[in-house]
Image: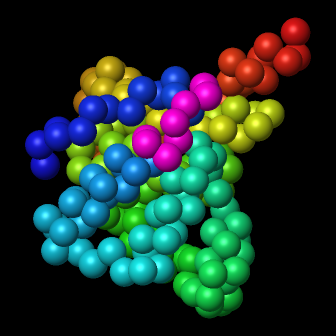
Amino acid sequence: MPDTEPRVDPATAFADHDHALCAGGVLARAEAVSAAAGARLTPVRRRTLEILLHSHRALGAYEVLERLAEEGFGNQPPVAYRALDFLVEQGLAHRIRRLNAFAACMHPGETHSPVFFICRACDAVAEAPAETVRDALAEVAQGIGFTVERMNVEALGLCPACAESTE
């Protein structure tokens, strides 16, 4: 899919900004990506993505389920897990393994290898491009005859606001 929207600056996750604007742009791209792939963004899938886009945080499946249940989408775990699995499969969300949680993809429709910067104090998550990391890993893997099929790079630390408050 052509890059029709400006890329979301990863630092945005850790700064005050017009979150509705950045979330709206990502949601519009996600809808276009789904339509182009012939995948249906059902109301529960769309709302799940909106919940993930609500803030730059990763959310656990039960947090998502709780919000879906409050809005009448059902309160059984498969409701959330099916929607989250769909979003991950379609490249509209990422699983953050460190947190056993999910975050909206900030670059839907783009082939990319992200790195996730996770604030250990406030759980904010920034998604940033990591093609150079991917290329370096692929080179090392090739040297030992290994083929990388999936990569998830997560860095744990402090966001600017939390780092400042600990000084």
Q: Is residue 8 left or right of residue 5?
A: right
Q: Residue 18: horizontal and vertical position, in percent?
A: 52, 36
Q: Position of residue 156 (x, y in %)?
A: 67, 30
Query: Between 117 and 10, which is closer to the camera in this rendering?
Result: 10
The C terminus appears in which quarter of the rendering? top right
Position of 85 with respect to 29 (left or right) is: right
Residue at the top extreme of this rendering:
167
Identify the residue at horizontal 69%, vertical 18% (top origin): 160
Q: Is residue 68 above or below residue 165?
A: below
Q: Residue at x 58, y 43 (%)?
A: 56
Location of residue 42 by image quarter: bottom left
Q: State yes or no: residue 93 in magenta.
A: no
From this view, report whether residue 103 is shown above or below residue 11: below
x, y percentage for residue 55?
Answer: 60, 47
Magenta residues, start to end: 14-22
Q: What residue sits 43% from the left and 74% below the top?
A: 45
Q: Does any portion of residue 78 appear in the rendered image?
A: no
Which of 135/157 is in front? 157
